[in-house]
Image (cartoon, rainbow, N blue to C red):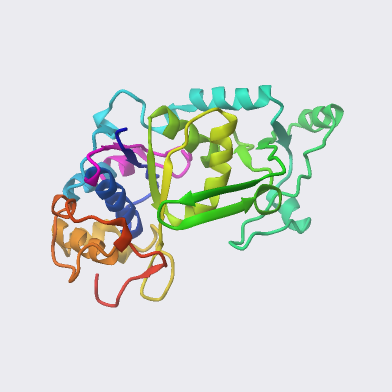
Amino acid sequence: METVGRFAPSPSGQMHLGNLLCALLAWLSVRSQGGRYILRIEDLDTGRCRPAYARQLEEDLRWLGLDWDEGGSLGGPHAPYEQSRRTGLYDAALDELRRRGLVYPCFCTRAQLHAASAPHREDGLTVYPGTCRRLTPEEIARRTASGRAPALRLRVPEEVISFTDCHMGPVREDLPSECGDFLLRRSDGLYAYQLAVVVDDAAMGVTEVVRGADLLSSTPRQLLLYRLLDLRPPVFRHFPLLLDSGGRRLSKRDGALGLEALRQRYAPAEIVGKLAFLAGQNPGGRARTPAELIASFDWDRVPKTDIRLPEGLF
């Protein structure tokens, strides 16, 4: 079976080194297997995402030598490739889950959840305590009539989800205690990442998902949705987070490590070579093009713990 991978950035600002590392690893993994690479634009949050950022993102990828086979402005058989234009697919998936009685409205606000001392996971995220799970039809009608639009949550079963990440190894999550009933659609009508990414990866025939370890904990929820929607899941490869020299996570606010600033100081092969060095693929960190790294690419050399930028590397 052909390997189909993807890079699915959110166009809410310029790319930083963490985004570039994801794009490079996903590209190398696919190209080393002779597969196809898809560029999908995850722009559901229209308040933060901008078409100009999406256009710049494509230009930056081309500048670095990271091409793609379908998606973005290139188009292809699974168009559209912008999530903001794919809501009909999410509607259909939500309707299927509703038909099976797996969805319920949630009227809780963040402030209410905080006041209720909802349980928290190790990563600090709140586990929804099920406050609205047993609302009667009359209670739902009364709250809806007050003009307050509800979010929609999935009823998770009493189940443990176990899977093996192809890079990080075995993962186990107890859905009720470590996940809770999670959002499918926000109260403002925007679809949640968990549902959209499952629907899109399945519809586009994605067989391999490469992404940062910060998303590892979301994988059990997605595997549950794959099963409930009778969709075939991809294999997952999560890689460790890239931290700055002080041990902090990178963000799009880190201007000095954003690609716009880096382009003024380095040639594309220099940036790629340094990223490949951090990923264990390029001893010495000399300038390399992505194409020059394909033949020797090996997931076994990619670190499994967070990667801290050495002082002076960039």
Image location (x, y in percent) of residue 277: 24, 66
**Range of magenta residues:** 32-56
Q: Quadrant of residue 293?
A: bottom left
Please identify the quadrant where the C terminus is shown: bottom left
Residue at position x 64%, y 59% in the image? 121
Q: With 199 as the anchor, is 23 left or right in this view?
A: left
Please identify the quadrant where the N terminus is shown: top left
Image location (x, y in percent) of residue 99: 67, 21
Magenta span includes 38: yes
247 over 32 or under it: above or below: below
285 over 39 or under it: above or below: below
Q: With 215 as the anchor, is 14 left or right in this view?
A: left
Q: With 152 as the anchor, is 166 left or right in this view?
A: left
* Total labels drawn: 0
Residue at position x 63%, y 27% in the image? 97
Looking at the picture, tell me which residue is in the foreground, 65 or 1.
1
Image location (x, y in percent) of residue 103: 69, 31
Answer whether residue 11 is visible to the viewer in this image.
no
Residue at position x 50%, y 29% in the image? 231
